Amino acid sequence: MIIALFILLFLLLAVSAPIFVALSFASLLAFALYTDMPLTVIAQRMFGGVDKFALMSIPFFILGANVMKSGGIARRILNFAYVLVGGIRGGLALTTELACMFFGAVSGSSPATVVAIGSLMYPALRDKQYDDKFSIGLITSSGSVALLIPPSISAIVYGAVTGASVGALFMAGFGAGIIYGLAFLLYSYYYAVKHGVPAGERSCLRDLWKATREASWALGIPVIIIGGIYSGIFTPTEASGIAAAYAILVSLFVYRELTLKELFRVSVQSAVSTAQVMILLAAASVFGWILTVGQVPQQLSNLITSYNLNAWQFLLAINVILLVAGMFIDGSSAIIILAPLVYPIAVKLGINPIHLGVVMVANASIGMFTPPFGLNLFVASSTAQIPLNRIFAGVVPFVLVSIIALIIITYVPDISLLLPRMVYKGMI
């Protein structure tokens, strides 16, 4: 049954079927052909796959990200980032990455970050003598940091399929996200120096005060999310609803750049995006259940045991598998399919489940802009009106930079685990 399942899956992916169709139809057909159980089990398993408390936060984070993009929050975050680093050589490129880190801390969505920041920064980068390939590569790749910086939808997905603490994953994403973003900042500075990109005008204290004051409401969102979770006032799921409500109130009544009509349009758009994520989770849940019934996790565990892989080698293998998978399917799908398989093996090898989650999410971040099917590639192509082949060439250096960051995150676990160990004393 398992062989037929994978053959059907790859055939459907080869003919460009949507991922949720490939997962669900392959599961349904394999189930119908090789078992005598009623097909209603498939529907029950699909419903069970999304009937999880942690997943309730996804629609709120998606709504919050879209409201921030349309309500002036993204633009103010961008201005604040430019005042901080705009006067350094390569300041505009540094601003782009720093703004993506800030916006990722309030949205949790990589594509939303590319649209919100990229649509504003790509023309500005081209105007300031940045090469076209570098500019589009930076825009496409920088948004990926949103998956690591909390709140992260991919971290929520990992927590849902493995039972790991979403709050601890959010805390762990801080350190990993800073290392990931710092790698892009250093490369951007190196590029600017090498190509003689001039520094921008340095901002004075008055400019900093003005930008901080204008962005203070926007910057309050990550403070609410992380501060509330850190202090135990609310759970990550509750934080998502509070963050979405806060973003709506600020956009409507403080910045006044969002009308009720626009809010309705954004809400409909967010509902569609949520449905796309949820149907994917439901289909992947059935696929993972069939793998479990077919004892694939046990067989994989036995295979790894037979090779006597240690934790270092196992993490290397996981990174290679996920990097390849990220070229063809989105990160959340890869996590849903692979996390239940590798989780018990990692625990057996003494790998911290939270660290494993951060490593998987970091791979998912890279997969967002890895050719040929990284989602950010298509989002950037649509946003900047640039052919995909030009974007492919632009992202290659950033893929290499992100892999260096991934290696550091993978083999220096204290980067990820320091903060959650401080918060969840004796539990991580």
Image (cartoon, rainbow, N blue to C red):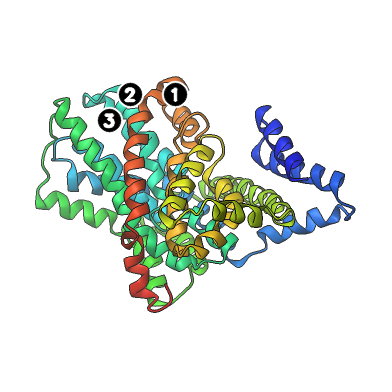
Q: Upstream in the sequence, badge 1 or badge 3?
A: 3
Q: Is residue 13 above or below residue 389?
A: below
Q: Which mark is residue 126?
A: none
Dot in front, 1 or 2: 2
User: Pointer 1 and pointer 2: residues touching (CB < 8 Å)?
Assistant: no
In the displayed structure image, the side of residue 289 where residue 178 appears, left or right: left
Residue under numbered circle 3: 124
**Residue 71, can we see it?**
no
Between residues 319 and 421, which one lies in front from this camera angle?
319
For the question of whether residue 180 can be seen, the reply is: yes
At horizontal 37% and vertical 69% (from top left) the residue drawn is 420
Amino acid bearing label 3:
Ala
Residue 298 sits in which quadrant?
A: bottom right
> Which residue is under mark 2?
133
Identify the amino acid type marked 1. Answer: Gln
Residue designated by label 1: 385
Q: Residues within 10 Å of mark 3 (few under 14, many from 20)?
A: some
